[in-house]
Image (spheres, rainbow, N blue to C red):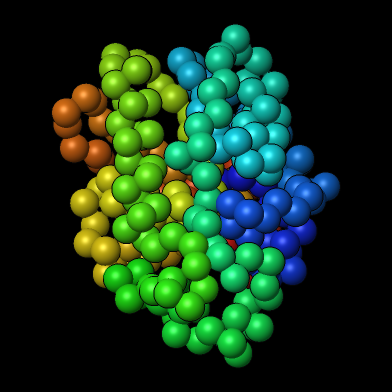
Amino acid sequence: MRHGKTQWNLEGRFQGAGGDSPLLAESYQQMSQVGQFLKPITFRHVYASPIKRARVTAEHILAELDQAIPLTLMSRLEEFHLGKLEGMRFVDVQAQFPQELDGFRNHPDQYRTDRIGGETFSEVIARMTPGIEAIVAANPGDDDNVLVVSHGAALNAEVNALLATPLAALRHRGGLRNTSVTILETAPGQPYRLIDWNDTSFLTETADPTDTI
């Protein structure tokens, strides 16, 4: 799942691994809602990005689940490192780095970081996949459900890569809303199967364009 909504999300700013604005007050209510949605599921483990917005989201959901579940922070689950784009408003990026913005949003195979620094889609996937594989290997049973709390752009790239989606088509399923749940099923050595994508049926607040990346 993606972390709760932050101030920079609301302001339309790039927020990668180097930025971490505060979670909005409304996000805590949404964390409670997703926690209640997930409560009937027995989880063996929770894994989260160590970046505060993801870690706090994971901690609040754990409290809602009311289960004795270990939480492990994994740096491989961090958001994209965004270089010069970090903290910039989308409208300013459009003015200064239009090609990079178009690649990031629409053409992952054409996203270049030469002028801005940071990670490409291929580099993020290469960083995250070993972490996901380690999680699967550590929880091999049919009933070993795990919860992974990470970030919108990174999760979008990694989930689609796990589903063997070509790099050029990584954005074709659309974005991920804050506190959305995406469900994958697999077993060690087996392919990944998509059960649900960007589920927000449990959220009572109407979606806003700034909720989704």
Residue at position x 63%, y 77% from top?
Answer: 90
Quadrant for the C terminus, please. bottom right
| 147 relative to 166, above or below | above
Which residue of the protein is positioned furthest toward the right in this rendering?
25
Residue at position x 70%, y 35% from top?
Answer: 56
Q: Is residue 208 visible?
A: no
| 128 relative to 134, above or below | below
Q: Quadrant of residue 84?
A: bottom right
Residue 97: x %, y % from top left: 53, 84
Residue at position x 67%, y 27% from top?
Answer: 59
Q: Is residue 149 left or right of residue 26?
A: left
Residue 30: x %, y % from top left: 70, 43
Residue 120: x %, y % from top left: 39, 63
| 97 relative to 8, above or below | below
Nearest the eye: 174 or 205? 174
Q: Quadrant of residue 133?
A: top left
Q: Is residue 105 left or right of residue 24?
A: left
Which residue of the protein is positioned furthest toward the bottom in this rendering?
95
Residue at position x 57%, y 21% from top?
Answer: 71
| 95 relative to 53, above or below | below
Q: Is residue 129 left or right of residue 199?
A: left
Which residue of the protein is positioned furthest toward the top in this rendering?
68
Residue 110: x %, y % from top left: 33, 76
Q: Is residue 130 visible?
A: yes
